[in-house]
Image: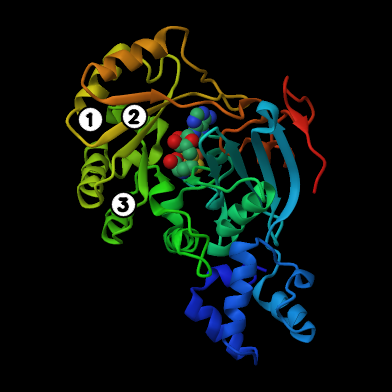
């Protein structure tokens, strides 16, 4: 079955009313189902006591098919970080990570099973693209996160930094942005300002996103300030060069008023030299921007590793000397392979890892 089953989260409220009508029910049943899903996070017919017993099963079956099956769940940081691995209807695996902080809860979601962009330092990139996720498959990850937190908390921030290149699955990702941000019962009602779409730098898609007049944050995975290094680290750079990518990013910032995040994984002796820090600072100086440095999380068998001690600090200082805001990203979930694609890789047996040899601090949780 190539396409996942249709789910109410694939449709806007008008579309859901039409679908429910086509099933022979009154349109307001779509609003009831939507409230169950987006406000109570349930797709279980028995919970839907405001629907007549005779129609619950049929409507839930048609409009709320289970899209995600929990394959594995791992926790670390004393339970503040939870990684969920999901099996989709066709067996494809994707992951999400829930990170609790004192002032917020951030959820990292996947937009594709695998990724076709081939960045050599990224676990997801090694396996290639399996398929795009549907809008509802993306939204369901967040609803599962809400269900895991309820009633004590809510997801406040969402980053499209799990598996996949969100802008290569443009339509479904934009649909998910609407479902996540539209108010209940249309969607989950999470502010667009708290959503971050991270891209490898697909210039036409960044320009298209600019036209949507959304207020989501844009993150650009730059990883190098010069085309020579970026051509290797981010192969799509051979198509759209750094200057073009940054031009599109600055236009996005100008139209939305939002500071663009520049993601930069520091890789020992590959992109962490002082001169590259200076060049990065000068490229970004004067723009509405924030640099997020990420210590490389080496993938199994990779020739690359994280920077030597002290190098990261010097890199930060040199970028900051240009008046550019720069922070080092917190490395939550490292011991459960929090970086992109790594848990899925251990389960599919493409690498040895914490499935067989848990790192200190990692523990397997029983499946719900
Ligand atoms: N495809 C999108 C979003 C998913 S990747 C993108 O590339 O932006 C999310 C972030 O994790 C990106 O910035 C990516 O470059 C980074 N990343 C991938 N593998 C990593 C690794 N092994 N160590 C550190 N960061 C990594
Ligand atoms: Fe894809 Fe992003 Fe990984 Fe590159 S870093 S392979 S774009 S998921």
Q: Quadrant of residue 335?
A: top right
Q: Is 175 above or below relative to 115?
A: below
Q: Which percent across, then down, holds residue 50? A: 70, 78
**Of 188 and 295, which appears nearest the observer?**
188
Task: State left or right for residue 270 relative to residue 59.
Answer: left
Q: Which percent across, then down, holds residue 365? A: 79, 37
Pointer 2: what residue?
A: 291
Q: What secondary structure is marked by label 2? A: strand
Q: Are marks 3 and 2 in contact (CB under 8 Å)?
A: no
User: Looking at the figure, which quarter contains the N terminus?
Assistant: bottom right
Pointer 1: what residue?
A: 284
Task: State left or right for residue 310 relative to residue 277.
Answer: right
Indicate which disc, 1 or 2, sits on the residue closer to the N terminus. Answer: 1
Pointer 3: what residue?
A: 206
Q: Which percent across, then down, holds residue 114? A: 57, 47
Tell me the CA gap for discs 3 and 2.
Answer: 18 Å
Q: Residue furthest left?
A: 286
Tell me the CA gap for discs 1 and 3.
Answer: 18 Å
Residue appearing at x 54%, y 83% in the figure: 17
Q: Is mark 3 within 8 Å of ligand 1?
A: no
């Amino acid at each position: 079955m190539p396409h996942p089953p249709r789910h109410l989260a694939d449709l806007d409220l008008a579309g859901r009313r039409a679908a429910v009508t086509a099933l022979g029910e009154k349109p307001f049943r779509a609003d009831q189902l939507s409230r169950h899903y987006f406000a109570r996070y349930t797709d279980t017919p028995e919970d839907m006591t405001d629907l007549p017993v005779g129609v619950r099963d049929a409507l839930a079956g048609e409009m709320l098919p289970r899209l995600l099956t929990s394959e594995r769940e791992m926790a670390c940081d004393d339970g503040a970080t939870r990684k969920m691995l999901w099996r989709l209807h066709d067996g494809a695996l994707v992951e999400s990570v829930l990170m609790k902080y004192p002032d917020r809860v951030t959820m990292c979601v996947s937009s594709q099973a695998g990724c076709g962009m081939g960045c050599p330092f990224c676990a997801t990139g090694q396996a290639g693209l399996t398929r795009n996720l549907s809008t509802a498959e993306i939204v369901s990850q967040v609803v599962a996160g809400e269900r895991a937190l309820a009633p004590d908390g809510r997801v406040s921030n969402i980053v499209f930094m799990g598996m996949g290149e969100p802008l290569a699955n443009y339509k479904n990702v934009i649909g998910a942005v609407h479902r996540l941000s539209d108010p209940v019962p249309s969607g989950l009602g999470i502010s667009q300002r708290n959503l971050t779409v991270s891209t490898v730098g697909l210039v036409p898609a960044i320009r298209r996103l600019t036209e949507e007049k959304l207020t989501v944050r844009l993150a650009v995975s730059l990883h190098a300030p010069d085309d020579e290094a970026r051509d290797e680290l981010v192969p799509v750079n051979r198509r759209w060069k750094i200057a073009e990518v940054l031009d599109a990013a600055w236009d996005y910032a100008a139209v939305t008023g939002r500071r663009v995040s520049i993601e930069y994984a520091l890789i020992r002796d590959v992109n962490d030299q002082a001169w590259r820090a200076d060049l990065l600072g000068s490229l970004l100086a004067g723009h509405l921007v924030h640099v997020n440095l990420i210590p490389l999380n080496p993938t199994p068998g990779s020739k690359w590793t994280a920077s030597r001690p002290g190098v990261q600090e010097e890199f930060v200082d040199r970028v900051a000397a240009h008046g550019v805001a720069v922070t080092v990203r917190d490395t939550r979930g490292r011991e459960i392979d929090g970086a992109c694609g790594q848990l899925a890789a251990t389960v599919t047996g493409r690498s040895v890892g914490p499935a067989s040899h848990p790192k200190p601090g990692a523990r397997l949780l029983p499946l719900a």
